[in-house]
């Protein structure tokens, strides 16, 4: 509880509102520091929530589209309007194509290779390497063409006899393989934007008893249809079946938006809730990958512009840099010499290198993500390895650390478990993703692997896993929120009580500005905490005959905070008693009488502080100002001397006197001193918090005296105010030196 009293408390206290704001807006980051969401993060969470609503609306549309496709396809099959052809016998060839040609009669096959089976729509396909002899030269090359054959079953032949005309429909997009029909007169190339179609007669189908198809997949990395099966359809049902492809294409697009968008939304929201740079890097990584995936998806149905290509590959390269920086933060690596602009340059270089890759690799559009993900996985594993051994060492040494040993044993065990799970999850994620990426990249480079799944499951596995690891980095968020809520509830109760104390202390002070017939003053009062150890009072005291003197008291209790503020209330009450006592005395006609009266004031205050029995030390400067004699009588109880500043002169006035409230040795004595004060003079009384940090009172007064004597300070008030503001800035840089600051500047009116 004592620690809570020592903390710096805000000026506004509202129990319910403050607790709600802290719980909803302030959460600890990875270092345990409290951070406030700025306007950028507020925009980010608004965009994230809007995106989540949009994506889940798209999910519903996707489910409806998928249901409609399945329902219409089933209806066409029941009506016997289509025949699905899924199973094909395959013979792979290597064909020598001319430049820009899509057909070739110069093809060779591996004579030792037996026939293969292919199922369309294609799920997974490993391209075989063929060993053949061509023009007296031996070759070993991956196949680039396949001859497919499907022989009709008796049931299919029965359905075929229901119509004299049939259409062979092969749904595809423009970036899939080129199809040829081979059991019709001549070999013709067909291909529309959304499908390939071949007209066949019942006579052709009955004579051959099968359907033959040739696929040239050399220019593209996707072999065959991936969305709907190849069918034989009656001409009147062909358009209806092709409409299913449009629905299926839209459903696939929505699926991809869902798979890319949800991790992005999760990471963006997590970055806002967590307020750590780790989660913010993950959100940027997801955004860059989403940009790349979206543009590449657009490229499957239409050529991309140069700007789109640059944006896609630059986003992919930037995602590599952001992933490495995320892992660096995740595992706690610290590179002190690396600055923010270094990271920006590194991200830009990665983006440019990724874009330059398409000039080096002819099939870079397909292999780009494999290259980047493989490199990212390998480098991430290197960073994990560089951090795991020091992390384990630190965990073992935490028991000897005073801060950690003060934690409950359950919290320490939880911390170790979270670190172990975090590193293990990240390592397993990169091992699985990296091994699959490297395997597919190797197969793509050697030509043994042609098929690439358009929905990148590796990236979709990576994002949730890294998100989970990132959340583990900050420990149990729920537990921290609960603990923080309890702390804030306790603190709010204390702050409410302190607010009452602050109001009471404020009512014990006079007006900060005053201008009357005889006097004018300005007081600056700046407490170091909610409750201060400084206190002052300026009042006119009336004697028995009605004449008045101006009484000034400034007291500075050792320290600041709750304890010191309680002492100021005692000082205030005994000072008020002393002032009221003067009303029973005759007006002091000379300075000796005035000095005798003044010396009774510190005695009265000392009696009150001594009654607290806490040996509270307090310094004080007390003054009585006679407007008739134009004199000021002062006495100091261990307080810095007063300043009397004239047009071109400064007098430092102090007296001998012991501090108030402590144990006194012998008889207490406070020596008074009387100085003249003209109409142009200004009396300055201050606490030691005004004196510049690192300077003595006499040295500071000497500097002021030189400036005033040289005529460089025509307005000494501004000079003193400048000193006060310089001290404020010094206290902000080093709060350990912070102290209450009180400054009283008084002149004749």
Image (tube, rainbow, N blue to C red):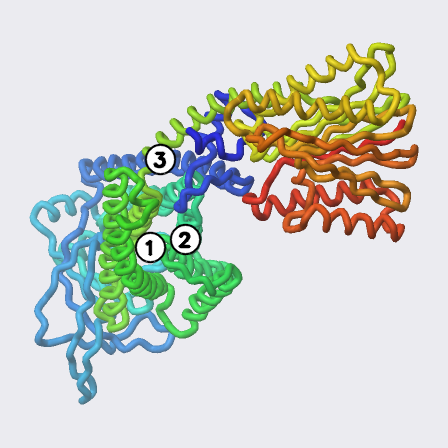
> How far apart are the two marked residues, 1 and 3, measured between alpha carbons?
20 Å
Q: Are marks 2 and 3 in contact (CB under 8 Å)?
A: no
**Residue at x-position 27% and y-position 71%:** 445
- The dot on residue 480 is 3
Q: Whole-Å distance between the Cαs marked 1 and 2?
A: 17 Å
Helix, strand or loop at mark 3: helix
Asked whether residue 480 is in view, the answer is yes
Q: Is residue 627 left or right of residue 535?
A: right
Left or right placement of residue 726 versus residue 471 in this view: right
Q: Is residue 679 left or right of residue 271?
A: right
Closer to the chain start, of discs 2 and 3, is 2
Q: Which residue is mark 2?
A: 285
Instruction: Pinpoint residue 370: horizontal percent, then vertical percent.
Output: 31, 63
Q: Which mark is residue 331?
A: 1
Residue occupying image coordinates x 40% and y 29%: 487
In this view of the protein, which residue sits in the foreground, 382 or 682? 682
């Amino acid at each position: 509880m004592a620690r809570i009293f020592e903390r710096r408390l805000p000026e506004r206290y509202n129990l319910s509102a403050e607790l709600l704001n802290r719980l909803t807006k302030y959460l600890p980051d990875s270092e345990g520091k409290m951070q406030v969401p700025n306007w950028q993060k507020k925009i980010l969470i608004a965009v994230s929530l809007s995106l989540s609503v949009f994506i889940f609306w798209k999910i519903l549309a996707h489910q409806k589209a998928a249901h409609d496709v399945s329902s219409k396809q089933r209806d066409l099959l029941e009506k016997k309007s289509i025949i699905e052809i899924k199973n094909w016998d395959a013979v792979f060839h290597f064909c020598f194509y001319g430049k820009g040609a899509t057909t070739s009669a110069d093809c060779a096959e591996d004579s030792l290779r037996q026939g293969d089976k292919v199922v369309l729509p294609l799920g997974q396909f490993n391209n075989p390497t063929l060993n053949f002899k061509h023009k007296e030269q031996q070759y070993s090359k991956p196949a680039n063409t396949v001859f497919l054959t499907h022989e009709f079953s008796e049931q299919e032949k029965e359905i075929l006899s229901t119509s004299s005309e049939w259409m062979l429909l092969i749904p595809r997009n423009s970036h899939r393989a080129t199809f040829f029909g081979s059991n019709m007169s001549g070999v013709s190339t067909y291909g529309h934007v959304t499908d390939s179609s071949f007209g066949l007669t019942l006579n052709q189908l009955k004579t051959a008893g099968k359907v033959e198809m040739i696929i040239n997949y050399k220019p593209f990395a996707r072999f065959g249809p991936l969305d709907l099966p190849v069918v034989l359809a009656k001409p009147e049902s062909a358009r209806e079946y092709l409409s299913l492809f449009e629905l299926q294409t839209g459903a696939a697009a929505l699926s991809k938006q869902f798979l890319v968008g949800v991790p992005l939304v999760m990471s963006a929201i997590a970055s806002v809730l967590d307020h750590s740079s780790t989660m913010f890097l993950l959100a940027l990584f997801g955004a860059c990958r989403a940009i790349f995936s979206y543009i590449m998806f657009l490229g499957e149905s239409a050529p991309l512009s140069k700007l789109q290509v640059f944006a896609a590959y630059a986003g992919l390269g930037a995602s590599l840099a952001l992933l490495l920086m995320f892992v660096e933060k995740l595992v706690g690596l610290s590179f002190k010499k690396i600055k923010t602009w270094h990271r920006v340059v590194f991200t830009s270089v990665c983006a440019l290198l990724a874009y330059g890759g398409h000039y080096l690799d002819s099939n870079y559009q397909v292999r780009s993500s494999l290259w980047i993900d493989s490199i990212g996985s390998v480098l991430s594993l290197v960073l994990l390895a560089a951090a795991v051994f020091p992390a384990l060492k630190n965990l073992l040494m935490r028991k000897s650390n005073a801060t950690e040993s003060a934690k409950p044993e359950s919290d320490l065990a939880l911390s170790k478990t979270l670190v172990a799970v975090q590193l293990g999850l990240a390592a397993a994620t990169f091992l699985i993703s990296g091994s699959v990426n490297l395997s597919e990249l190797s197969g793509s480079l050697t030509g043994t692997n042609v098929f690439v799944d358009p929905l990148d499951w590796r990236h979709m596995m990576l994002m949730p896993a890294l998100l989970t690891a990132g959340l583990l980095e900050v420990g149990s968020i729920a537990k921290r929120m609960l603990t923080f809520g309890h702390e804030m509830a306790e603190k709010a109760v204390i702050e409410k009580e302190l607010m009452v104390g602050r109001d009471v202390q404020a009512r014990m002070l006079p007006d900060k500005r005053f201008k009357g017939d005889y006097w004018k003053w300005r007081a600056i009062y700046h407490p170091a905490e909610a409750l201060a150890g400084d206190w002052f009072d300026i009042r006119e005291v009336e004697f028995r005959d009605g004449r008045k003197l101006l009484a000034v008291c400034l007291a500075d209790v050792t320290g600041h905070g709750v304890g010191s503020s309680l002492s100021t209330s005692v000082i205030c009450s005994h000072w008020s008693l002393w002032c009221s006592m003067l009303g029973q005395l005759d007006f002091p006609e000379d300075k000796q009488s005035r000095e005798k009266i003044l010396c009774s004031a510190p005695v009265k205050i000392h009696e009150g502080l001594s009654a607290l029995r806490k040996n509270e030390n307090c310094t004080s400067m007390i003054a009585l100002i006679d407007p008739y004699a134009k004199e000021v009588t002062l006495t100091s109880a261990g307080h810095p001397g007063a300043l009397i500043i004239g047009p071109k002169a400064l007098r430092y006035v102090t007296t001998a006197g012991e501090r108030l409230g402590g144990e006194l040795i012998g008889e207490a004595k406070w020596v008074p001193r009387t100085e003249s004060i003209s109409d142009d003079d200004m009396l300055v009384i201050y606490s030691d918090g005004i004196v510049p940090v690192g300077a003595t009172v006499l040295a500071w007064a000497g500097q002021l005296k030189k400036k005033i004597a040289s005529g460089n300070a025509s307005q000494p008030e501004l000079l003193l105010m400048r000193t006060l503001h310089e001290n404020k800035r010094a206290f902000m840089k080093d709060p350990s030196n912070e102290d209450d600051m009180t400054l009283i500047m008084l002149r004749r009116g």
